[in-house]
Image: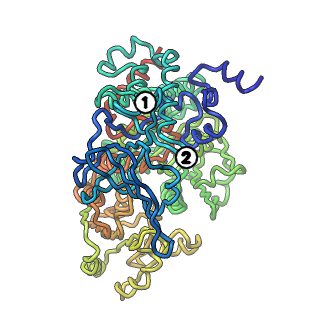
């Protein structure tokens, strides 16, 4: 059976673009570069903007600084060379009868072959000057007389993303012909009774496709986008809910109710009372681990809110029930800190704790190693290695889950037979993102800090204030406190000028902080060197630690009360908040100073959020608005599909509506 026969057997919109007249191998290759491989991809190719060509502006009325669409006939064009024939400017002059417009392109001499005197052009660009009227690098489209002329002029015209070798005119014509053919094959993807009430005011899917490409008013494209965004959100959430329902239908839980023989003495030895938020979350977790289906829970909580204690209690419940527990952390620093904490907590209970990282393997000596279950294994990605076996695995805990991909999470879970899963993050996830990404997980939030913690005072300072900042740090060192200084780079590399590197600044700051001792920590050090640097800082042998974002998770030194972050504009808000969480872990007042070299409006806006708020959820929402969802979870990491129309910042109402529609669909 040849490709043409296979294509005919597919539903129309699922056919490859080569099934369309005029799309051969070369055109298909061009479309593939735009991620268009099927007819459905083509009719969902979103215009990047629209031009109102119903009333094109006359050249004579164009104003300086205005971005506008105009048209006219090319009356002259050519290339001028200068600087010994190494630089050029291609210029064409457009005349519409009212005035002339000079259009210029720098160092693009090949354009001379694309335009000829007499061509009719539509151009879009910004007017730089009036004498003569000039646009640099405008977008252009050659207008030819033909049967499809109405597609390109006299209407609100879509302007699409293109690729090399493709023109707006060709792609616009292809999409118009394809949409006309496809409309009869398009149906509502969801039951009509389910959509009728919720989407009042939104067009049908068929209407949305037409309005996307051939709007009759300026209000139609935004309506079309919202309807198609809703479909994307419903598709994603229905898939998540369906998989979750299927999982729970097939799988039986390893019941881990525990008997409190370890949990009770552990809580007594802690020496402090759990917060009400921790108590609430523990009840939720115990109910999950005692239930008929495996726990699948996301635990969110700000830095210092007590997530590790919750993880310890979960581990003890599983161990009380005779199972092994695995805790996976993204860095060796964090894994080793967990190992130290859990070993301290669990040794009095006679529970063995093992460590497995890329560079270290620690197994308890003696009779403890004979136990095949009822143990805790802490590690990094090394836990995923093929030779690592985790017999009787009852609970998997993943810390800082946003550092791991979905596949890694699943690989660890598959080392057991449907163990319980607890994923933890100190990077609060905005509600809209959480509903979309983690619909397969129940969510618990630690929204209360332990008593006695002081709010960290945060200040943004210009780079020229650095000497005063250094002097402030020296004052704190003189009282016996310690400080972190964080840089965005390890060493000078190619990239934006003015970005500081920790290795290059080390010698300078050693002198600035003398006689106090300064340590150095970054990712290119060997494991023994990292270990020595951290131990020296933990013990107080070094008072200042110069480092990179390597310490974002894992280093816990209550005596460190000051953090200076250089080139703070290079970090995302979520990352800055995580870094700031390394201080404020003791009873003394702590200070975070953000020194920013670039003073753009966007950088100032972001950093001002850090100045005014210590609330991780508020900061997360601000980061989502400013930088988008990539700061929390990249597409590849999360398994999130490529959204053509959905927007996490503007579509919060659609996300919640999609949640309700998807729940009803799954229930049916």
* Camera-side residue of 151 and 186: 151
Rendered location of residue 417, percent (x, y): 64, 35
Residue sitting at x 41%, y 73% = 497
Rendered location of residue 632, percent (x, y): 42, 48
Rendered location of residue 27, percent (x, y): 61, 38
Residue sitting at x 41%, y 35% = 645
Circle on res. 405: 2
Q: Are marks 2 and 1 in contact (CB under 8 Å)?
A: no
Give the quadrant of the N terminus.
top right
Q: How is the image coloured?
A: rainbow
Q: Is residue 77 left or right of residue 198?
A: right
Mark 2 falls on what kind of element?
loop
* Camera-side residue of 437 and 66: 66
Q: Quadrant of residue 608?
A: bottom left
Discs 2/1, front = 1
Query: Which mark sits nearer the N-terminus, 2 or 1?
Result: 1
Circle on res. 187: none
Residue sitting at x 59%, y 46% = 408
- Give above or below for 544 relative to 245: below
Residue carrying label 1:
149
Rendered location of residue 217, percent (x, y): 29, 28
Residue sitting at x 55%, y 46% = 405
* Camera-side residue of 327 and 611: 611
- Give above or below for 243 relative to 575: above
- Give above or below for 606 relative to 494: above
* Camera-side residue of 644 and 305: 644
Mark 1 falls on what kind of element?
helix
- Give above or below for 532 relative to 283: below
Residue furthest top in the image: 193
């Amino acid at each position: 059976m040849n490709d043409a026969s296979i294509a005919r057997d597919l539903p129309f919109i699922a056919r490859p673009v080569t099934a369309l007249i005029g799309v051969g191998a070369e055109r298909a290759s061009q479309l593939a570069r735009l991620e268009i491989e099927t007819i459905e991809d083509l009719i969902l190719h979103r215009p990047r903007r629209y031009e109102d060509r119903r009333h094109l502006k006359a050249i004579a009325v164009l104003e300086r600084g205005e971005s506008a669409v105009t048209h006219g006939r090319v009356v002259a064009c050519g290339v001028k060379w200068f600087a010994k024939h190494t630089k050029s400017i291609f210029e064409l002059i457009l005349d519409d009868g009212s005035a002339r417009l000079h259009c210029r392109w720098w160092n693009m001499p090949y354009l001379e072959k694309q335009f000829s005197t007499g061509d009719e052009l539509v151009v879009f660009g910004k007017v730089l000057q009036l004498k003569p009227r000039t646009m640099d690098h405008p977008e252009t489209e050659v207008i030819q007389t033909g049967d499809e002329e109405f597609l390109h002029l006299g209407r609100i015209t879509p302007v699409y993303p293109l690729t090399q070798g493709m023109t707006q005119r060709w792609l616009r014509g292809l999409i118009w012909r394809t949409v006309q053919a496809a409309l009869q094959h398009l149906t509502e993807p969801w039951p009509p009774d389910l959509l009728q009430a919720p989407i009042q005011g939104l067009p049908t899917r068929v209407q949305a496709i037409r309005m996307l490409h051939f709007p009759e008013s300026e209000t139609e494209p935004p309506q079309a986008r919202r309807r198609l965004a809703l479909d994307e959100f419903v598709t994603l959430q229905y898939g998540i809910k369906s998989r979750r329902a299927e999982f729970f239908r097939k799988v039986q839980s390893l019941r881990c109710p525990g008997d409190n023989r370890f949990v009770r003495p552990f809580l007594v030895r802690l020496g402090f009372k759990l917060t009400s938020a921790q108590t609430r979350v523990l009840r939720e977790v115990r109910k999950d681990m005692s239930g008929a289906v495996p726990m699948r829970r996301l635990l969110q909580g700000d830095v210092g809110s007590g997530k590790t204690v919750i993880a310890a209690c979960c581990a003890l419940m599983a161990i009380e029930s005779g199972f092994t527990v695995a805790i996976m952390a993204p860095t060796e620093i964090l894994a080793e800190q967990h190992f130290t904490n859990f070993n301290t907590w669990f040794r009095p209970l006679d529970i063995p704790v093992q460590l497995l990282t890329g560079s270290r393997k620690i197994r308890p000596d003696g009779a403890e190693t004979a136990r095949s279950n009822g143990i805790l294994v802490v590690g990094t990605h090394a836990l995923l290695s093929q030779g690592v076996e985790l017999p009787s695995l009852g609970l998997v805990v993943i810390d800082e889950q946003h550092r791991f991909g979905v596949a890694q999470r699943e690989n660890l879970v598959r080392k057991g037979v449907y163990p319980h899963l607890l994923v933890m993050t100190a990077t609060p996830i905005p509600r809209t993102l959480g509903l979309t990404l983690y619909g397969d997980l129940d969510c618990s939030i630690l929204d209360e800090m332990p008593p006695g913690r002081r709010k960290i005072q945060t200040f943004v300072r210009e780079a020229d204030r650095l000497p005063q900042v250094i002097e402030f740090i020296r004052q704190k060192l003189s009282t016996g406190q310690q400080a972190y200084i964080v840089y965005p780079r390890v060493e000078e590399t190619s990239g934006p000028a003015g970005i500081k590197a920790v290795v290059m600044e080390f010698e300078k700051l050693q002198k600035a902080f003398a006689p106090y001792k300064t340590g150095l920590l970054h990712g290119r050090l060997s494991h023994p060197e990292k270990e020595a640097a951290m131990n020296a800082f933990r013990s107080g042998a070094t008072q200042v630690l110069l480092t990179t974002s390597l310490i974002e998770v894992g280093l816990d030194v209550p005596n460190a009360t000051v953090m200076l972050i250089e080139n703070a504009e290079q970090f995302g808000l979520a990352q800055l908040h995580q870094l700031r969480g390394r201080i404020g872990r003791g009873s003394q007042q702590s200070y975070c100073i953000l020194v920013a070299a670039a003073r753009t409006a966007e950088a100032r806006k972001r950093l001002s959020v850090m100045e005014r708020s210590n609330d991780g959820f508020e900061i997360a929402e601000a980061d989502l608005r400013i930088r988008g969802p990539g700061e929390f979870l990249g597409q590849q990491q999360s398994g999130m599909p490529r959204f053509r129309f959905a927007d996490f910042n503007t579509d919060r109402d659609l996300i919640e509506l999609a949640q309700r529609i998807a729940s009803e669909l799954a229930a049916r």
